Image (cartoon, helix red, strand yellow):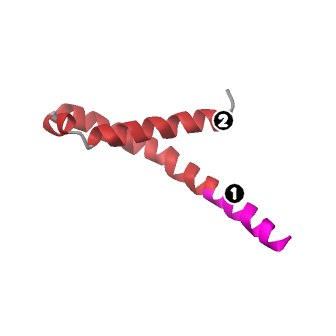
Amino acid sequence: MDVEDRLNEIEARFEQIKAEMSSLEAATDHGRMRTLGQLFAELEQIVRPYREYRQAVADVAEARELAA
């Protein structure tokens, strides 16, 4: 497994946690919501820069395409 695969897994987990946080079950369980919030915050520190990196790579590819 390479780094990009691992980052994609982390991003998928981040999205799962985000969806679970918006569920009614989590909203009524304060302990679970606290745990999810902590996980969300930890993963967001990884996911946000990764998404910014992917966008930058896409922007560079687009710029190269336009310049050609």
Res. 60 image quadrant? bottom right
Residue 32 at what x, y percent from top left?
23, 32
Query: Which residue is situated farthest in the bottom direction here?
Result: 67
Which corner quadrant holds the C terminus? bottom right
Looking at the picture, tell me which residue is in the foreground, 23 or 37.
Answer: 23
- Magenta span: chief secondary structure: helix
- Residue underneath mark 2: 3
Residue range (magenta)? 55-68
Q: Residue placed at 45% from the left, 41% from the top? A: 43
Q: Is residue 32 above or below residue 64?
A: above
Residues at marks 2 and 1, CA–CA distance in whole angstroms? 16 Å
The question of residue 40 being in magenta is answered with: no
- The N terminus - image quarter: top right
Can you identify the residue that label 1 sits on? 57
- For residue 58, above or below residue 8: below
Q: Secondary structure at mark 1?
A: helix
Q: Position of residue 3 (x, y in %)?
A: 66, 35
Task: Specify the amino acid type for callout 1.
Answer: Val
At label 1, counting other C-alpha atoms closer than 10 Å, the crowd grade (few under 14, some 14-19, many 20 or more) is: few
Q: Residue furthest left?
A: 28
Residue 66 or residue 38, whichever sits in front: 66
Report x, y in % for residue 21: 28, 41
Q: Amino acid at mark 2?
A: Val
| Left or right of residue 25: residue 67 | right
Count how many numbered circles sit on residues in the image.
2
Q: Nearer the viewer, mark 2 or mark 1?
A: 1
Considering only order in the chain, which callout, 1 or 2, is on the residue closer to the N terminus? 2
